Amino acid sequence: MTERSERPISASGAKTFKVAFDLEAEGADWPPVSVERLWGEKTDVRFEIRVLNTPFFVRGIAFGDLIAVRPDHERRELVYESFTAESGNSTVRIIFMRNGDRRVIENGLREAGCSWESISEFANLVAVDIPADIDYRKLRKWLLAKVESQDIELQESAVSAVHRGQLPHFP
């Protein structure tokens, strides 16, 4: 688990940058921000970035995915332009409905091999990274049981082709 403000260290030693993702409103109160900034590292391709953390609000992006960015000189930041390639990882968001169950759910995520990020502004929300080698069918069944028992709300934000292939009837 990491706090969003930490600058990630690139495994390759590449320089890291924040990339702005402009968000469109999905509802009156969602998402609660208009821009989300994710850490990324340069690749060998010009204006391509590998995402180094798990998004809270951006849909369709997971840890390790490759994206194209463009410099926005007016805003003085890099801005997301398009999706390039998926890493095989998936992203889900969990909202904890009962504080007493949080430790049980976090332990289950840890045992499954997942990591997650949290931020203090949204204390009951975590962004979960599901690595490509995880059996998502088993994890999803467990998560949906937690939804059914009203322990959590779940949003499958970015389900990779690897994980979709494990689910015969994925929406």
Image (spheres, helix red, strand yellow):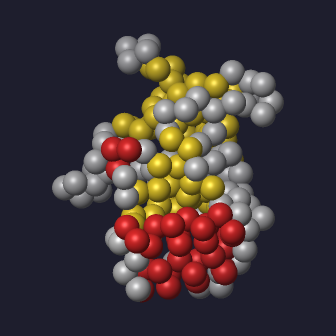
Q: Nearer the viewer, residue 45 or 37?
A: 37
Q: Nearer the viewer, residue 84 or 141?
A: 141
Give the residue furthest to the right. Answer: 12
Residue found 47% across the figure and 56% down from its top: 126
Residue found 47% across the figure and 80% down from its top: 146
In the image, residue 70 above or below residue 166: above
Task: For residue 171, say whether it is visible.
Answer: yes
* Left or right of 36 in this view: 134: right
* Left or right of 30 in this view: 106: right
How many labels, in total? 0
* Left or right of 77 in this view: 46: right
> Residue 140, percent across and down?
58, 77
Task: For residue 170, say whether it is visible.
Answer: no
Q: Nearer the viewer, residue 119 or 56?
A: 119
Residue found 38% across the figure and 44% down from its top: 120
To which quarter of the image does residue 11 belong? top right
> Residue 112, percent across and down?
69, 69
> Residue 33, percent across and down?
31, 42
